[in-house]
Image (tube, rainbow, N blue to C red):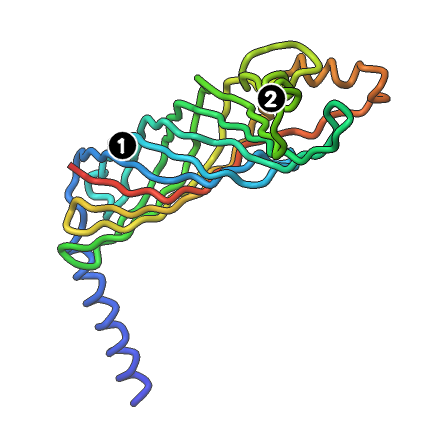
Amino acid sequence: MMKKILLVVAAMAMFTNSAKAFEYEPEEGFSYMGLFGMNISKLQNYGFCTKAGAMMGARVDYVLPKAHGTYLTAGLDWTMKGGKGDITGEVAGTNYEATGKYALHYFEVPVRVGFRYNTSEAFGLYGEVGPYFAVGFAGRYKISFDEDGNSFREAEDAASHKAFKNYGYPTESFQRWDVGVGFRIGAEYNHHYNLMIGCDWGLADIYRVSYRDDFKDDAANNGKTLPKVRNFNFSITFGYRL
């Protein structure tokens, strides 16, 4: 008998929570959000470490009718990705230590499906997942030597270059187009203020095909092939919903 009573109490509790969830369901229709934040990105399989960057953009969300918080979202972002690493070598007979940095600027279009759960009238939680499509519009590789002097400054200028320009082998260059998949989880307060964290995994090899082929054909590389290089990005974002 006691077991049956406990089951009834548990069922009533679940029903009450469900009823409150329906009570605070998101309003159907469109809403708009502006956002900005910080990226921590990396060029996977490149040997570089993570690099901090920035992002900003806009979103349009559409809460589906009678879907209990399910929504579609799309946007347009400016996002900064890349990576950095330590380099050693020799210039003018002097050993050096240097830092190389790739700063890759993209226009990015995320398209996702999500679900939102409002715990109260003023507070909601949500998560979303889906692909993104991006095009690089500016990018640069910059090398900075620890030592000073004309020979090192000249070497910096010679090694630094635009990341997306097709120079031809042996100067490394990346293709502009990227595609990947990502997710976001977030919280919203008072129907306006948002905090989100998320990750994006690039699926495209961003090395230029011509550079990859020329590298393999170079006799000095003995037919070695380059690993595929893909973008990875972790983001912390603040948003304001209109």
- Quadrant assignment for the C terminus: top left
Q: Secondary structure at mark 2?
A: helix
Q: Residue furthest front?
A: 149
Q: Residue at x 18, y 51 (%)?
A: 25
Q: Is residue 210 above or below residue 83?
A: above
Residue 111 drawn above or below residue 8: above
What is the quadrant of residue 7 in the picture?
bottom left
- In terms of secondary structure, where does tag 1 sit? strand
Amino acid type at mark 2? Arg
Return the residue nearer the eye: 228 or 16: 228
Is 196 placed left or right of 80 in the picture? left
In x, y percent, where is residue 26?
Answer: 18, 47
Q: Is residue 174 left or right of residue 52?
A: right
Residue at 17 percent of width and 61 percent of height:
20
**Mark linked to residue 153:** 2
Percent position of residue 193, x then y: 20, 46
Judge left or right: residue 33 versus residue 159.
left
- Alpha-carbon neighbours of circle 1 within 10 Å: few (<14), some, or many (≥20)? some
Number of numbered discs: 2
Q: Quadrant of the N terminus?
A: bottom left
Which one is nearer the viewer's eye here, 205 or 74? 205
Residue drawn at x 65%, y 29% is 228
* Front one among 9 and 52: 52
Q: Is residue 47 left or right of residue 60?
A: right
* N-term-proximal mark, 2 vs 1: 1
Q: Nearer the viewer, residue 159 or 5?
A: 159
In the current view of this chain or complex, which residue is farthest to the bottom? 1
Question: Mark 1 sits on what residue?
Answer: 59
